[in-house]
Image: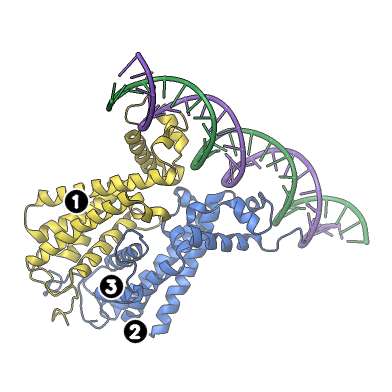
Chain colours: A blue, B yellow, C green, D purple
Amino acid sequence: MTYHHGNLRKSLLDRAAHVIAEQGIESLSLRALARDLGVSHAAPARHFADKAELLRALATEGNDRFIAYILEAADATGSDPLVRYAAMGKAFIRFSLLYPAYYRTITHPDVATHADADLKASAERRNLVVLDAARAAQAAGWLTNEKTEDVVLFSIATVRGVSAILSDPLTPYRDEDADALIERMVDLIIDPKNPQRNSLSKRKGAAQ
Amino acid sequence: MTYHHGNLRKSLLDRAAHVIAEQGIESLSLRALARDLGVSHAAPARHFADKAELLRALATEGNDRFIAYILEAADATGSDPLVRYAAMGKAFIRFSLLYPAYYRTITHPDVATHADADLKASAERRNLVVLDAARAAQAAGWLTNEKTEDVVLFSIATVRGVSAILSDPLTPYRDEDADALIERMVDLIIDPKNPQRNSLSKRKGAAQ
DNA sequence: AGCTTTAAGTTGTCATTGACAACATCGCGC
DNA sequence: GCGCGATGTTGTCAATGACAACTTAAAGCT
């Protein structure tokens, strides 16, 4: 019957991630969260000024977990930069399916996002990880004719698109084997078996 | 001071689309909608059993507008199937930026979606339009080595990804010229100037 | 040790909201 | 011209987010 909870902030974030993953973000209620943790309805306010701030904190934590997950996947594949980059792309999609609460809060932050320095910083860290990996792949001879920004933009668009499709209940691709689909789609883009390619465009003569 | 409103259902949908586009979907309130339209707080219930049903109706309307918008863009480019397909891809992204409320409700429907026959039917109509266009492009000689499903999946993933990036406040690509970006990204995928390509993979020898 | 200050939790309250029930009115079909 | 169903209305309830005022635990200072 401790008056203090111990680590309410972390418990709130964990429980919120769980509820969002199970029942969707619209079912998330601060009061229900407090009840679940055996704490009064106003306790969450000591840690988060309002509901949006909790969601931003969740997105911040999600960014860091995202980075860890992606780097771990890259490390598991070895040191070849292009193979690593492909592994990160696949890990991106898997993360979005494995941790929908983090992914949702990361990709659909609320409007006040700009005022949250922590969230912005974590997002920049995440962007930097991808940028570095793309640079490394280019330094190893891949897509040397393209600007790194374009490579990143194209890669992120693809993995975000696949993530969106795989979690969309109105799309006809849900029942397929997601893992096989992820492999196929990312390899179409990154094509680690063809490292000598030097342009994103598929025209035979490379860049135009 | 007419007792009846006239066409409350349509007014509610229109106003809801406006509010979502301006202030986000989380700010949408049935009561505020009713106030805006000068109607009592329970009037919307005559047309939508609950808030989720209104959002599903908005998604249904969105699907039909989406179809119209995309076909119009295709028709404006002429009759070459590959050029049409590329135009539809670009129109897809533009629609997502132009009508965020429709796009949001279409791509993030609630869990009860499966029970809504109208919504499901409109989504299937929309999928069919894309499928037909992809088939036509293949019949004209494009990507003849690929299954149409794969072509569609890849195309949709790309345009959804670009849409996601362009409307993400935490992404560094917002300030760019969206139109130029759309052109570039879609042409990278569809590449209407290179209609003889017959495989999605970029390896020189086509399909392996 | 004892005092103070502050972080963390509590109870109480308020306006807003979605949902529902019971009632009122409009207008169309007979 | 009447009856009935569609459409709106008023009234109410429980849940929620936000806030204010109060309490307690814990950490720090002397």
User: Which mark is drawn over residue B70?
Assistant: 1
SS for callout 2:
loop
- Number of residue marks: 3
Q: Identify the residue position indicated by label 3 in the image.
A: A185
SS for callout 3:
helix
Separation (CA) of disc 2 from disc 3: 20 Å
Separation (CA) of disc 2 from disc 1: 42 Å
| Amino acid beneath label 1 | Ile
Percent x, y for residue A121?
Answer: 48, 61
Eye-nearest disc, 2 or 1: 1
Separation (CA) of disc 3 from disc 1: 24 Å
| Residue occupying image coordinates x 33% and y 81% | A83
Q: Identify the residue position indicated by label 2 in the image.
A: A80
Quadrant placement of the C terminus of chain B: bottom left
| Residue lying farthest to the bottom in this orientation | A78
Inspect this view and state whether residue A122 appears.
Answer: no
B4 to the left or right of C12: left
Mark 2 or mark 3: name the one nearer the start of the chain: 2
Task: Say above or below: A107 vs A136.
Answer: above
